[in-house]
């Protein structure tokens, strides 16, 4: 059985009534953001503010990364209605690429704000993995009266760089951008070979059968032309749908003080599920950043697994998240 078949079999075990709807949102600048929208009840039913989530995926992933986790959350947080809107962030998956070439984290926040406005959601919860977790902490700090709950998956805020390092970082960005002009896009003759490549990402690697969940949104058809002995052969295959500008250093990075200014504004309950074999830097920042969120509002737990454990072992991650969400019902969130 291929990796894509294995992944499909895993997801199909869930209630078919919980299959997501494809959504599109056109922003004021013309950019189209696409998403997967899970609902445990019909669109005419409005869940409580603490039972509807915007989900932000990780770096170079897409909304498919929530395929294993979202159905479990819908099933086990029931019988009350629950909905999860997982975005393909700009430049990722099936969403448009930015014409401005600006993929700073705050741009994703601005996109999400417009989408929430289109949905008519006054308040809602958020869940974010990796880069999506960084976006979540900034979003929760910026719109502190809007966010009811915040779930972080192997993340504790944005990656940062000292102010003194910023000039060198910008020089490297400019150099990377020039080199990108002559760099060939990756080519994969089969979807399975793309899954294998995605599994070799070190700390970011995902087991091939779960990397397959990213492929329907993460690949687009491509051709490779081979010239040999005067003959031309055209091979059909696949390349990544992600904007290649995302593969180089950003023009700017945040400082610790910048990140702290946002995270100290967070007032909603926050739950962080850390992977024991996740990104190494999180262990370094975890201790001092927990003090940035008001005392008593943050809980941190860990689970065995790598950075994408929410995909590779969604039942385990859900077993941590669901009791925490239900426990919030004893407090002020229950009124929402």
Image (tube, grey):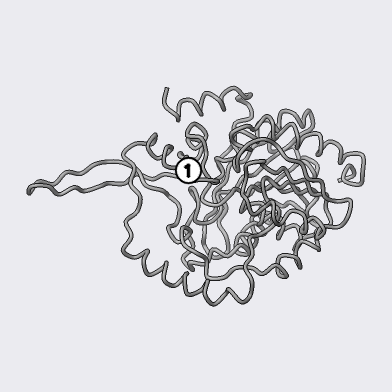
Task: Locate residue 140 relative to residue 276 in the image: left or right.
Answer: right
Tell me where residue 325 appears, x and y as whole percent.
81, 39
Toward the viewer: 47 or 7? 7
> SS class of the residue under badge 1?
helix
For label 1, count other residues whose C-alpha is less than 10 Å away and answer few (under 14), some (14-19) or many (20+).
Answer: many
Residue located farthest toward the right when viewing the structure as drawn? 331
Tell me where residue 242 appears, x and y as whole percent.
45, 52
Q: How many marks?
A: 1
At a point 76% along the width and 61% down the height, the residue shown is 263
Position of 135 relative to 181 (above/below): above
Give residue 178's quadrant in the image.
Answer: bottom left
Residue located farthest toward the left when viewing the structure as drawn? 230
Tell me where residue 207 appears, x and y as whole percent.
51, 35
Task: Locate residue 111 relative to residue 53 in the image: left or right.
Answer: left
At a point 75% along the width and 64% down the height, the residue shown is 262
Task: Locate residue 30 relative to residue 279 in the image: left or right.
Answer: left
Q: Which residue is mark 1?
A: 217
Position of 287 relative to 175 (above/below): above
Q: Quadrant of the N terminus?
A: top left
At a point 57% along the width and 40% down the height, the residue shown is 65
At a point 86% along the width and 37% down the height, the residue shown is 327
Toward the viewer: 16 or 188? 188
Tell me where residue 193 appears, x and y as whole percent.
37, 37
Position of 284 relative to 303 (above/below): below
Give residue 145's quadrant in the image.
Answer: bottom right
């Amino acid at each position: 059985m291929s990796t894509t078949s294995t992944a499909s079999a895993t997801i199909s075990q869930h209630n078919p009534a919980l299959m997501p709807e494809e959504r599109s949102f056109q922003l004021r600048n013309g950019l189209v953001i696409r998403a997967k929208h899970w609902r445990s009840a019909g669109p005419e039913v409005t869940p409580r503010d603490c039972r509807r989530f915007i989900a932000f995926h990780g770096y170079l992933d897409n909304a498919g990364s929530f395929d294993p986790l979202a159905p479990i959350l819908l099933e086990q947080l029931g019988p009350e209605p629950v909905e999860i809107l997982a975005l393909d962030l700009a430049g990722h998956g099936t969403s448009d690429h930015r014409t401005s070439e600006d993929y700073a984290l705050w741009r994703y926040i601005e996109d999400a704000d417009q989408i929430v406005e289109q949905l008519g959601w006054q308040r809602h919860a958020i869940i974010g993995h990796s880069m999506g977790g960084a976006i979540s902490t900034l979003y929760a700090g910026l719109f502190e009266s809007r966010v009811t709950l915040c779930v972080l998956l192997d993340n504790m805020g944005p990656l940062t760089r000292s102010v003194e390092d910023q000039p060198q970082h910008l020089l490297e960005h400019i150099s990377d951008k020039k080199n990108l002009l002559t760099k060939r896009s990756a080519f994969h003759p089969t979807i399975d070979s793309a899954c294998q490549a995605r599994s070799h990402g070190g700390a970011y690697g995902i087991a091939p059968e779960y990397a397959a969940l990213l492929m329907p949104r993460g690949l687009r058809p491509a051709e490779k032309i081979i010239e040999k002995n005067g003959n031309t052969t055209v091979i059909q295959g696949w390349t990544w749908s992600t904007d290649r500008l995302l593969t180089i250093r950003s023009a700017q990075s945040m400082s610790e003080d910048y990140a702290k200014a946002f995270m100290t504004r967070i007032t909603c309950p926050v739950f962080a599920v850390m992977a024991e074999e996740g990104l190494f830097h999180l262990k370094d920042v975890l201790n001092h950043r927990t003090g940035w969120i008001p005392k008593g509002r943050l809980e941190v737990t860990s689970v065995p697994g790598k950075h994408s454990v929410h995909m590779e072992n969604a039942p385990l991650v859900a077993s941590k998240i669901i009791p925490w969400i239900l426990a919030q019902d004893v407090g002020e969130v229950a009124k929402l």
